[in-house]
Structures are given as structure tokens and as C-alpha cells.
Amino acid sequence: MSAELVDYDEAVTRFDPVIGIEVHVELGTRTKMFDAAPAGFGEEPNTSVTPVSLGLPGSLPVVNGTAVEYAIRIGLALNCSIAETCRFARKNYFYPDVPKNFQTSQYDEPIAFDGHVDVELEDGTVFRVEIERAHMEEDAGKNTHVGGSTGRIHGAEYSLVDYNRAGIPLVEIVTRPITGAGERAPEVARAYVQTLRDLFRALGVSEARMERGNVRADVNVSLRATPDSPLGTRTETKNVNSFRSVERAVRHEISRQAAVLDAGGSIVQETRHWHEDTGTTTSGRVKSDAEDYRYFPEPDLVPIAPDRAWVEEIRAGLPELPAARRRRLQGEWGYADAEMRDVVNAGAVELIESTVAAGAAPAAARKWWMGELARTAKERDVELGDLPITPAQIAALQGLVDAGRINDKLARQVLEGVLAGEGDPEAVVVARGLEVVSDDGPLLEAIDAALAAQPDIADKIRSGNLGPVGAIIGAVMKATRGQADAGRVRELLLERVQG
């Protein structure tokens, strides 16, 4: 079929997109889902394993109770019903990162089901996403394909398998088909995944660091002729691990599928690989249906029956959830709705909260994160929180401004130094010699020099015309490389001329 993509805006005028998202979150437990191996990150390959992790004969699994509690927390926060009884099943398939040749998951009896979550889009629109289920399972190991140009198995010279991740507790959250989003489907997908990431962190169930793979999204996309038409054939783009990529993957698949349909082709139900560098997807494998996995109940694990009193105890202990927290913080900070929406969209809520906690005023914290730092993040094409600067450093920088030791112009130079790795704001001020000049002696010398260069200005000021004052202050600021205390310069200038 045609390799040309249909323009996105054109595609969504002629087709109705339907999306579905499966989000996997690694739970932050000390040990794995079914054994006592540590569930850490960054260990030497194949060191965080036990016979259970490796699927050795005779090894028996034991359910991690903390993982069950975390799964219930997630289900409750997503407004799900919590099953009175549920069980694990074996999902059978062969792949070298699953040493048992089956994954222990949940199939027809998930721990949580029938929920919903409201996500806020960039313009403040709230879109409800229906949750079909949230179920527990274990992660697979990690394959590293060596050689070749793509990092994938095709074309690689050989592959290495690390089983440290095998058995890490996961919760998979599956949406119902998300309809009615229209041209905003990519935005809804991004906002939904971001809402879940924030939720996981608030619940304390995961670090939810997407760059580490703690949160991964599988994005399903299909097209149909009209909102009243039957659902189209879907594709599933696997393991998309950034908000931006989720949005881009949905846009690309809509344009690609529209091109296939326009050319008279049919969409293949398949998994697809996401390519961050090109912003495109490529075919993976024909998507298996549930029966192809030959699910059957896990005979080595008894069913789980969460006590109702325990579930209600967990519900009562849930922390303030992100949406409520944002409303509270907005009131405390005095931000307008548009200002708070910009902060949320920039991913700056936690950064500003930490900056305020470190001593900065809310207005000042917003000014730095949404101003200079937002521009820097955009120039570097990174997330705001990935910049090499901390909220404590921003609070310290603002503290130097508040104390009169630097002005806003000098503060921007200090900020450059901190971002360049030159140390904390205090160290940058000292090393670069950026402190405001407030001694009267050097300021009077600079004022006299400026007046000597423009003698007519003094007469104008004496006659009551204060308009030229700015020109003298500007000359003094230039002579002191911006380090003069402008307020003190004005006072000394008027005393000099009018006194």
C-alpha cells in the first residue's frame, strides 16, 4: 500500500479515530511479585534472581502481599470495583525473556474492574476515560540485541538476556475503547498517560519514571467511517515510554491507517514498533487474541480474596489525589485558572511546590519555572524536570534577589552558571563576581562620569524634568556591567543634581 501518509487534519475529517491504551506500571515493592529476589534497578545482569525468577523446575511462587495492596490502591483511585475474589492465570507464549515460557498474570478475574478517570486537557476541557480492568502480573526480563543498526533482533549478531526484571510486580490498566475524542485523540492519549503517572506517584506505589520503563504504554488505534459505524481493526503500538511519544504515535497511526484505507487496503490487527527518531511505526507481529495464549488458572497459587474491611481501610488511607491537590495548591498560590493550567501542562506543579517549600514566593517560583527555565527546556528539547537545576537552587537564587545582592538581570546570568554546572547560586555569584554594587563611592564615580558625558542632562533634571534620569541610570548600569543597584543610583543621582 501507499507509503505516503494522509495529512492528519484531513484524516480526522474523514475518519473517526478510536483509541485504547494499556498502561503497565512497575510497582515499587522491595521484592518481586512471586519470590524474594530484590526488585531494584541497575544491578549487574542476572544478579537479582532466584529459582522462581528463572523458572527452574520445582520452584514455587508466593504472592507479594504489598503488591496486592498497591494494586488495590490503584483500583480504588481509578474508581474501580475491587473483586471479592480473583485469581492468577498462566499466559503461555515462548520468548527468551520469559524463562518459564508463561507469564503469571490475571485473565478473566482481575483484581479491579469497571472504573473511570477524568483527565484534563490543555485548554481545561475534562474528558472521562472508562477503565475496563486493572490486573496484576509479572514483568518479563530484558533482551539486549547486539549488532545491527536498529537495536532490534532483526539484523542483530546475537542477543543477551537479563532476568533481573523477570518477576517485577506489574499492574496493567486497560481502558475501554475511547470514543468521542475526534481530532483531539492524540491529546487525550497523552493527558491520560500523564494523569496515570501522576496518580501512581501520589499513591506511592511506583517511582513512575518513564525513562526507566517504570511506566509503559501500549497504544491501540483504529479508524471507522463515522461515530455510528462499527469499530475498525486496531493496531497496537508497543512500549511507548514518553508522553510526547504517546501523542505522536497516535497521530502517526491515524495518518498511516487513513492512507492504507484510502489506497483500498485493509488494516492488519498487529503489534507495531515505535521509532522515536523518525516518529513512525513499523510492523511487529500479528496480534494474538486471548485464546492464542491458552490461558488457564495458575495451579500453584490460591485465589486472592481481599477482606472488605481491609479494602475500606486502604480506601480511607488514600492520599490526596493529583486533581484535588492541584485545586488546593492553586488556591494557596493565588494563581488564575489559566496560570495554573499552564503550570500543569508544563509538568511544573511538583517543581513549583518544592520551590515554594524551599522558601520562594509562589509568584517568583512560577516566574522562573515558566519563564527562563521553560524557554531553556524548549531550546534543549527536554522535559522541564530534566534540566540540571533543583527547586532548592531556584529558591536560593530568588533569595539572593530578595536580599538585594543581585538584580533580575544578574540573576539570569547566575541561572546560566547553575545550568552550566558551575555550582549553587551563591557559588556562581562569587565565582563570576556578579553581586550588585551598592557602595556609594563606585556608584558616585559612575554617575559623575555619565553626567560629564551628557552635561545638558543635569540642567534638565534641575529644572524638574526627570525624564533623562533613565538615561543616566542606564549609563551607570552599563559601566558597572549591570551590577549597580538601580534604586540607589537614582537616589544618589537626584541628590547630586538637585542637592
Image: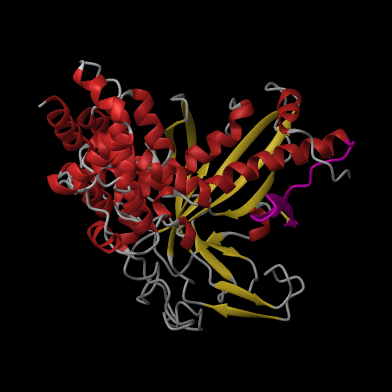
* Nearer to the camera, 347 or 130: 347
Q: Is residue 277 magenta?
A: yes
The answer to whether residue 169 of the structure is visible from this angle is: yes
Q: Quadrant of residue 388?
A: bottom left
Residues 435 and 85: in front is: 435
Q: Is 452 displayed left or right of 214 in the figure?
A: left
Q: Is residue 37 above or below residue 88?
A: below
Q: Is residue 332 left or right of residue 376?
A: left
Q: Residue at x 58, y 27 (%)?
A: 181
In the displayed structure, 145 sits above or below 218; it is below
Residue located at (71% from left, 51% from top): 281
Instruction: From the top left corner, tell me how far across and down residue 334 is, in percent.
Output: 24, 27
Q: 488 left or right of 107?
A: left
Query: The magenta stretch spans which residues?
Result: 263-285
Which residue is located at x 42 percent, y 55 percent? Answer: 386
Q: 385 or 418, which lies in front?
A: 418
Q: Position of residue 221 (x, y in %)?
A: 66, 40
Q: Is residue 418 magenta?
A: no
Q: Would you say residue 308 is visible in this rendering?
A: no
What's the residue at 24%, 22% (across, down)?
459
Task: Look at the image and tell me in which quarter the N terminus lies.
Answer: top right
Q: Is residue 235 left or right of residue 316?
A: right
Q: Nearer the viewer, residue 455 or 170?
A: 455
- In percent of width and height, residue 254 lies at 71, 37
Question: Which quarter of the rendering shows the C terminus?
Answer: top left
